[in-house]
Amino acid sequence: MGWLHWERFLCGTDCTTDPHRCVSERLFVEMADVMVAEGWRDAGYEFVCIDDCWMAPTRDQQGRLQPDPKRFPSGIRKLADYMHSKGLKLGIYSDVGNKTCAGFPGSYDHYDLDAQTFASWGVDLLKFDGCNSGTLELLAEGYRRMSLALNKTGRSIVYSCEWPFYLRPVQQPNYTEIKHYCNHWRNFFDVYDSWSSIKSILDWTALHQDSIVKIAGPGGWNDPDMLVIGNFGLSWDQAVTQMAMWAIMAAPLFMSNDLRHISPEAKWLLQNKDVIAINQDVLGKQGYQVVKDKHFELWERPLSGGAYAVAVLNQQEIGGPQNFTFSLSFLGNGLACNPACSIQQVLPASRDWGVYSWVSSLSVEVNPTGTVLLKVVVL
Ligand code: GLA
């Protein structure tokens, strides 16, 4: 869990006219300060991550990557020290090819050197993009080599990949191999600050669940991309859907928003302990869609202790709240509520639904594009 600059701040490099939003050490220090002061770190958001556009246009005389000197005058080592002094961790970004997606120097031909540089700076996570990699063989080879290079440094560095996303148009990803090398991996397009983007990620995930759900678990996760809650594009119900479904999908939770200016509602949702507990459940199983019935989708995620997280999503974008009624015997292959269970609603608001037997049905009212998230505990 953490914060990543990309979706909200993109590639702002002009600190003269936009000092508060350009990609600079100031942005990360200010975000870290808020993360500590406003309870984000204590809620579990630990990593403060730099995305593309942090680099100077060229490597230094020893061939090492260097930060843009105007925007990162203190250097990355100092920034990492600062994060560590606050109980946070620092993430950085590079690319398997010879240029990043935004055209800055990539790591091609420099995997060992760059891994050593990041480790010497005290970096804790590397997001490794896949632009400009040349051939598919070079893409795969680069992702493997950077993984080995990071391990060789001896420093514990989370390795965030986009390998399957860049591979998929041409080849079925081998997820067993990808999990061997990466800690999480993007499968699909970049998230945007819009409902159509969130919806497309959910639709893609449901369509491919047979190949991607089983591979997820401790050490390696599917990454549906950043949480965009707290920005401009999602209604309240759509924000609830993103939070609920990212918990069901066992997604890495990296927010991309401006924590210095965020509504109390968005903060409540992003810091909600019960949703975070589902997202971070120690069993580490990813959830999946159980039923799709016209515009309603029923998803479940097995949790530790025989419990289940259950989401009811209403995809209808017209009209008002609608009821979805389903038999509790649908859940957990008939076992989630057998012989009985207690049901707690987590989102959109916390509520005790009481005790049910496994022959009962549940009727849930869901707003358009909203989700009701429940926790079902077997008795
Ligand atoms: C790609 C990635 C994004 C972001 C940008 C940066 O599009 O998928 O997440 O890192 O590059 O240029």
Image (tube, helix red, strand yellow):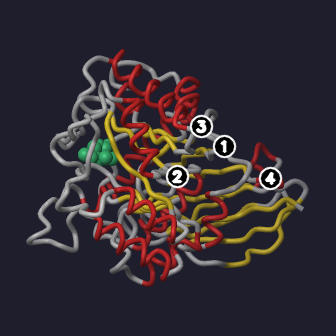
The reply to whether residue 270 is visible in this rendering is yes
Query: Where does residue 44 sit, x and y in percent of width and height?
Result: 58, 66
**In the drawing, does residue 107 fall left or right of residue 281?**
left
Residue 76: image quadrant is bottom left
- Name the mark on residue 213: 3
Label whose residue precedes the other's in the sequence (2 or 1):
1
Label whose residue precedes the other's in the sequence (1 or 4):
1
Helix, strand, or loop for circle 1?
loop
Label whose residue precedes the other's in the sequence (2 or 3):
3
Label whose residue precedes the other's in the sequence (2 or 4):
2
Helix, strand, or loop for circle 2?
loop
Q: Quadrant for the C terminus, please.
A: bottom right
Contact between marks 1 and 4 (CB within 8 A): the answer is no
Amino acid identity at mark 4? Ala
Amino acid identity at mark 1? Pro
User: Which quadrant does ligand 1 occupy?
Assistant: top left
Residue 61: image quadrant is top left
Residue for badge 4: 336
**In the drawing, does residue 116 fall left or right of residue 353?**
left
Indicate whether 134 appears above or below 96.
above
Q: Marks 2 and 4, Cα distance to the nearest angstrom? A: 25 Å
Amino acid identity at mark 2? Pro
